[in-house]
Image (tube, grey):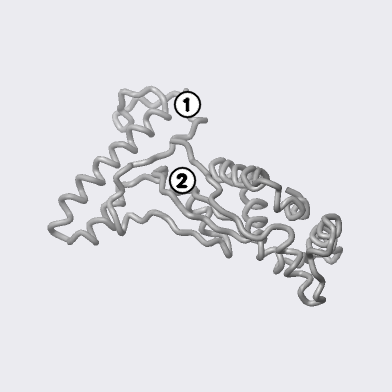
């Protein structure tokens, strides 16, 4: 199945960020126009000429997603500072759904090696990966069943998952403040980033832009997104 991203909640927005920035001067954000809020976020906090954005107020804006993705993308996500991530754990339960991701750009790429090591009914790598993953899933469940009475259920679950492949999918709850979101999107939308995490970053930004009434309009403008 494809990787999926769903926006499940948000907090703050441009006004909350402005309110945090204006606290020291006791300026009432509700008395300020939308253009004044924009000027603060875009020109004074993020692009203030010093080359060092004032990031702290942007931590008052928060976005939260459910992400179903491959293990490789999960690793990319957890490397980001201030991102709060919780996800399915095979240590606590047997993974029953056996979700996995297949890269679309592999479709139609032929298997050229006909040697014994790659002997398979399939003739392309996309299908071969599906077969390999499904075999790993079968081994995972069979191994877990045999290990459990010998090693105990806990150890069986945490070690049988070694049969799970890197393209196995888990579902994560991912929460970021907007400063963290900027860092994540900047790094993971870059052309040097892996395709799968680029697609996740792009979908996250799209979903934030589509929030009704566009509460992060000026924040995203300040970020150049």
Front of the two marks 1 and 2:
2
Q: Which callout, 1 or 2, points at the residue further toward the start of the chain?
A: 2
Q: Which residue is mark 1?
A: 107
Structural crowding at the residue carrying mark 2, measured as other residues with C-alpha within 10 Å and reported as few (<14), some (14–19) or many (≥20): many
How many marks do you count on the picture?
Answer: 2
Q: Tell which of 113 and 169 is nearer to you.
A: 169
Q: Does residue 13 appear left or right of residue 113 in this picture?
A: right
Image position, residue 80 (x, y; %): 57, 60
Answer with the quarter of the image where residue 63 lies: bottom right
Q: Which residue is mark 2?
A: 68
**Distance from the alpha carbon under mark 1 to that under mark 2:** 21 Å
- Residue drawn at x 82%, y 71% as measured from the top left: 27
**Residue 84, relative to residue 205: is it above or below?**
below
Q: Does residue 8 appear left or right of residue 50 in this picture?
A: left
Q: Residue 193: in sight, yes or no?
A: no
Answer with the quarter of the image where residue 100 lies: top left
Image position, residue 158 (x, y; %): 29, 58
Structural crowding at the residue carrying mark 1, measured as other residues with C-alpha within 10 Å and reported as few (<14), some (14–19) or many (≥20): few
**In the rendered image, which quarter contains the N terminus?**
top left
- Residue drawn at x 62%, y 59% as measured from the top left: 11
């Amino acid at each position: 199945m494809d990787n999926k991203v769903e926006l499940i909640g948000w907090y703050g927005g441009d006004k909350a960020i402005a309110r945090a920035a204006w606290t020291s001067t006791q300026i009432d954000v509700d008395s300020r126009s939308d253009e004044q809020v924009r000027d603060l976020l875009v020109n004074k906090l993020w692009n203030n000429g010093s080359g060092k954005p004032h990031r702290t107020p942007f931590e008052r804006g928060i976005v939260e997603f459910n992400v179903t993705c491959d293990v490789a993308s999960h690793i990319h996500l957890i490397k980001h500072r201030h991102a709060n991530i919780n996800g399915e754990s095979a240590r606590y339960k047997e993974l029953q759904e056996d979700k996995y991701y297949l890269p679309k750009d592999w479709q139609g790429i032929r298997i050229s090696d006909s040697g014994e090591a790659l002997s398979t009914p399939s003739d392309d790598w996309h299908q071969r990966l599906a077969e390999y993953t499904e075999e790993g899933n079968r081994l995972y469940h069979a191994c877990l069943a045999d290990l459990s009475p010998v090693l105990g259920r806990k150890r069986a679950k945490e070690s049988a998952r070694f049969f799970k492949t890197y393209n196995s999918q888990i579902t994560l709850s991912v929460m970021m403040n907007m400063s963290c979101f900027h860092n994540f999107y900047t790094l993971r939308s870059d052309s040097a980033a892996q395709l799968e995490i680029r697609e996740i970053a792009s979908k996250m930004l799209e979903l934030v832009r589509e929030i009704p009434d566009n509460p992060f309009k000026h924040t995203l403008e300040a970020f150049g997104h």
